Amino acid sequence: MPGTPGRAPPSIPARPPRAGYPYGVGVASHRRAFPADLARAGEARHFVAWLGAAAGLPGGSLSDLAVAAEAALTDVFLSTDGGVLEVWSEVSGEELRITVGHPRVEARRMSDLEGILRQFLDDHEISSTRVVLVKGLGG
């Protein structure tokens, strides 16, 4: 038993560290497509968090990005009937831009999406086919 005097803790086999994103996206690739299906929503949310962390967002900014991304993704899931959701990022200067796009958003259904994005992001853009989340990398 671990912690018992006179006994060594169980050994844990060493494993090589995993590089990059675990869902088949390497460090250089910052674009991914997901089925626009609530059953797969966790993958898209995790990818957005990974993009923020990989860009170097500090903890508080990463949390703000996660809240805004949750709202944007929920809006897409509520406003579409299937299809493919694309998520990609760009870093320019001191700014991270994450775009959530879907070609068939009929009408936005997330209540006060604009207000949520304004509260948690440094900037944002909303169009009929995409939402762009902008967060400064300086914190």
Image (spheres, rainbow, N blue to C red):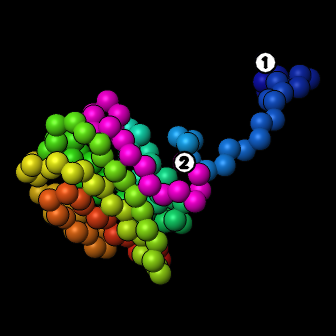
Residue drawn at x 52%, y 65% as measured from the top left = 55
SS of the residue under disc 2: loop
Q: Nearer the viewer, residue 37 or 13?
A: 37
Left or right relative to 89: residue 102: left
Q: Position of residue 48 (x, y in %)?
A: 41, 53
Please indicate, yes or no, whether residue 129 appears anywhere in the rendered image.
yes
Of all residues shown, which one is farthest toward the right?
6
Q: Which residue is mark 1?
A: 1
Q: Quadrant of the C terminus?
A: bottom left
Q: Whole-Å distance between the Cαs marked 2 and 1?
A: 39 Å
Q: Nearer the viewer, residue 89 or 124?
A: 89
SS of the residue under disc 1: loop
Residue drawn at x 17%, y 48% as measured from the top left = 104
| As drawn, 22 above or below 90 | above
Residue drawn at x 37%, y 62% as measured from the top left = 98
Task: Please report whichever mark, 2 or 1, sits nearer to the chain's N-terminal start.
Answer: 1
What label sits on residue 25 in the rendered view? Answer: 2
| Quadrant of res 12 | top right
Q: Position of residue 71 (x, y in %)?
A: 24, 51
> What's drawn in magenta, residue-wise?
25-41
Of all residues shown, which one is farthest toward the bottom?
93
* Residue 131 among those drawn in magenta: no
Q: How many marks?
A: 2
Left or right relative to 2: residue 6: right
Please indicate, yes or no, whether residue 119 appears anywhere in the rendered image.
no
Q: Amino acid at mark 1?
A: Met
Q: Amino acid at mark 2?
A: Val
Left or right relative to 76: residue 1: right
Q: Quadrant of the N terminus?
A: top right
| As drawn, 12 above or below 107 | above
| As drawn, 139 above or below 68 | below
Other residues around mark 2 within 10 Å, as few (<14) / some (14–19) / many (≥20) = some
